[in-house]
Amino acid sequence: MRVSFLLAPSSAIYQGYRNLFASVGSSLDLDCGAPNIFQPLIFLEIIRMDGITQLRPDGHRVTLTGRIVTIHGMDRSMRGRVVCKVISSCNQAQEDVDLGNLLPVPPKGTKHFLTT
């Protein structure tokens, strides 16, 4: 299966080894693939030690175009392993696409301080 990360003009993303660094405030396009699932329901899950956050397309913060999920306005709370859930419309097939670890970072050129 081929999983690709697409960049919108407003995106700032750098792909490392299974780590996805995205600038806070940027938009991020993620191609969920899974071409063999017909008319799917598609959403993202961000998995952290403290729980799972679902990001479902809402037409504003999270949008869906074909099989590409766009997160608008990345923020620090979106840190974690990101999995794209692709479920067939008749609920008979499901594919989980592990996209890697999402790590929101400050935009380039800004100063930031680590706190303990």
Image: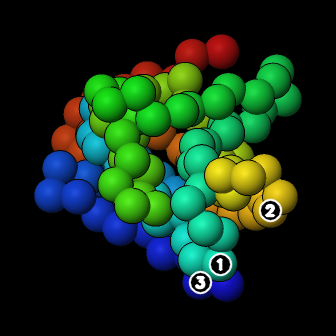
On screen, residue 10 above or below 107: below
Locate the N terminus and report the quarter of the image it occupies: bottom right
Of 16 and 64, which appears nearest the observer? 64
Residue highlighted by disc 1? 36
- Residue sitting at 43 percent across and 50 percent down? 69
Residue type, label 1: Asn
What is the secondary structure assignment of the residue under circle 3?
loop
Residue 41 picture location, percent across and down: 60, 48
Colouring mode (rainbow / by chain / secondary structure / one colour): rainbow
The answer, for residue 27, to whether it is visible in the render is yes
Residue at the disc numbered 2: 93
Q: Position of residue 110 (x, y in %)?
A: 24, 33
Tell whether label 1 touches label 2 (CB within 8 Å): yes
Q: Quadrant of residue 71?
A: top left
- First in residue order: circle 2 vs circle 3: 3
* Residue type beneath disc 3: Arg
Mark 1 and mark 3: span between their CA atoms?
Answer: 12 Å
State the CA–CA distance, disc 2 to disc 1. 9 Å
- Label 1 secondary element: loop
- Determine the secondary structure under disc 2: loop
Cα gap from disc 2 to disc 3, whole angstroms = 18 Å
The residue tagged 3 is 2
Rendered residue at 67%/39% (across/down) = 45
Which one is in front in this view, the residue at disc 1 or the one at disc 3?
Answer: 1
Badge 1: how crowded within 10 Å, few (<14), some, or many (20+)? few
